Image (cartoon, rainbow, N blue to C red):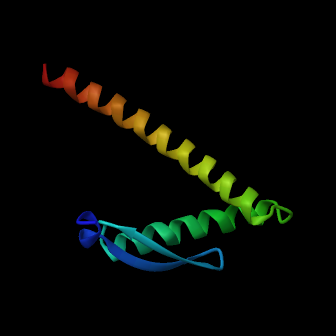
Amino acid sequence: MAGDKNKNRTTVEIYGQRYVIAGTEPSSHIHLVADKVDLKMREIQSHNRFLDSKQLAVLTAVNTMSEYLKIKEELKKLQQRIGKEES
């Protein structure tokens, strides 16, 4: 495929597992994301040592999405406030 030529392949380790991530983002960005995911998984695991990897991955995804949606809503409010101030 022509689109595959623009993709970088980066090997990362998350929670003791190696993954090859393909994408257009720089390798440094992929490593940063992987490090953040690994830290979040370890943080959640420290509160409940009985979670298996699958449960831990799902809880990490849920926590991350929750944080993302809160930040997105805050951004929307700030953009609305800025728009009102410019009027």
Above-or-below relation of 19 to 53: below
Determine the residue positioned at 38% across, 77% down: 9
The residue at 13%/25% (across/down) is 86
- Give the residue at the far front of this rendering: 1
Q: Residue at position x 74%, y 65% from top?
A: 53
Foreground pick, 47 / 18: 18
Q: Is residue 77 above or below residue 8?
A: above
Quarter occupied by the N terminus: bottom left
View extreme (left): residue: 87
Q: Would residue 56 appear left or right of 61 to someone viewing this image?
A: right
Residue 16 is situated, as x and y percent measured from the top left of the image, at 65, 79
- 64 sits to left or right of 46: left
Percent position of residue 79, x then y: 27, 31
Image position, residue 40 (x, y; %): 61, 62
The quadrant where residue 37 appears: bottom right
Residue 53 left/right relative to 60: right
Q: Position of residue 28 (x, y in %)?
A: 35, 76
Q: Which residue is situated farthest in the right direction here?
A: 50
- Name the image quarter holding the C terminus: top left
